[in-house]
Image (cartoon, helix red, strand yellow):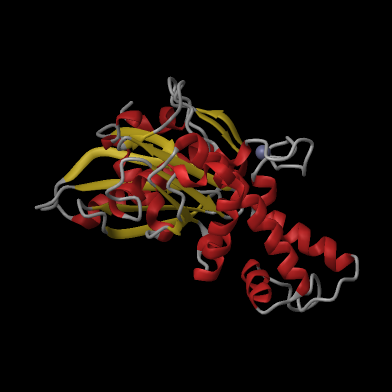
Amino acid sequence: MSLLRLGVDLGGTNIAAALVDENGALHHRKSVGTRVDAGVFGIASDITKLVQELVATAGEDRKISPDIGIGVPSIVHPKTRVVVHANNLGWIDVDLKKYLLPLLSDYKIHLGNDADCATLAESRFGVLKGYDNGLFLTLGTGLGGGFIYRGELFTGGLGFSFEPGHNTLVLDGDHCTCGRKGCLEAYVSSGALRREVDKRLNAGEPSVLKAEGGDPYTIRDIFDASDAGDPVAVRVIDRYVYHLAAGLANYINIFQPDIVALGGGISKRGEAFYRRINDGVERALDWMAPFVKREVMPAKLGNDAGIIGAALLATDPSYQG
Ligand SMILES: [Zn+2]
């Protein structure tokens, strides 16, 4: 019987957990709302309950690994394994593991950055499978991502992990949620898209998109309106693709991956979107373009990549602590 691994994805809205088998399939997925107000103790006890429910549901005939992997929306300190800075949980230097260990004393707990988890999942079971070097970025409310280098997660010289959203793309550029200016994330997050649309609507530019009233627009509406030729949406998406392509080209230049994939809510667009990105990347790479593998494609695993990757943390050398 195949070994099942416990994976937990701790997000700002939900905590999702499941047992993951050796083929990357999820069993008995469960989730609860994240009680941010309950603090680290409340969240640790909710994680414990989810784990205990999963183990009980699996039954005694299933072999479950004693490793629990937990993906967190933060850098994890490479030595102390403390959650360094989780904006949406309001956590700075929080030792989640210290709270979990007495509650789950039969297990070994591995904490990892959520984007690293998704990258690991895509490399074992998704679009990066079969490639030694794979770059993966997630596009949503923020910009996360990871890099597989020679078959393992690349976590940097000091082990703090790859943080693709907060590298300066434009000096003294747009404000980023991290407090700095000009980060790539400040141009390719869903918030950036809304800000640009609202700026144009407030200036009176004609558009099918409406900022206020009974039916405010969604991120999908902006892309759909752009596909339909709406002048505001076209300009906003052109700007988005221009910056995303420049950011991707930077990472392609540095890491020289065999494959580049995009995940997250915004990545779920059709061929036309990827054609625009790929054209933009080629332009941004300029003379370097012929020397690198640069095709950008959508990820495969969707939202469950975080749980699957968390369950795999114990199997990656970077996270065996
Ligand atoms: Zn930033």
Residue 2 shown left or right of residue 218 in the figure: left
- Front-lying residue, 282 or 63: 282
Q: Quadrant of the C terminus?
A: top left
Kindly identify the residue that appears in the image at 26 percent across and 54 percent down. 24
Give the quadrant of ligand 1.
Answer: top right
Residue 207 x %, y %:
80, 76
Kindly identify the residue that appears in the image at 90 percent across and 65 percent down. 203
Count the numbered circles shown.
Answer: 0
Kindly identify the residue that appears in the image at 78 percent across and 70 percent down. 232
Res. 195 visible in picture: yes
Residue 271 x %, y %:
49, 69
The answer to whether 27 is drawn above or below residue 11 in the figure is below
Residue 35 shown left or right of residue 98 in the figure: right
Kindly identify the residue that appears in the image at 24 percent across and 57 percent down. 57
> In the displayed image of the protein, which residue is found farthest to the right?
203
Residue 38 shown left or right of residue 127 in the figure: right
Residue 166 shown left or right of residue 199 in the figure: left
Determine which quarter of the picture holds residue 108. Answer: top left
- Front-lying residue, 31 or 262: 262
Residue 19 x %, y %:
27, 52
- Front-lying residue, 6 or 185: 185
Residue 245 x %, y %:
59, 51
The answer to whether 26 is drawn above or below residue 219 in the figure is above
- Front-lying residue, 123 or 170: 170
Res. 36 visible in picture: no
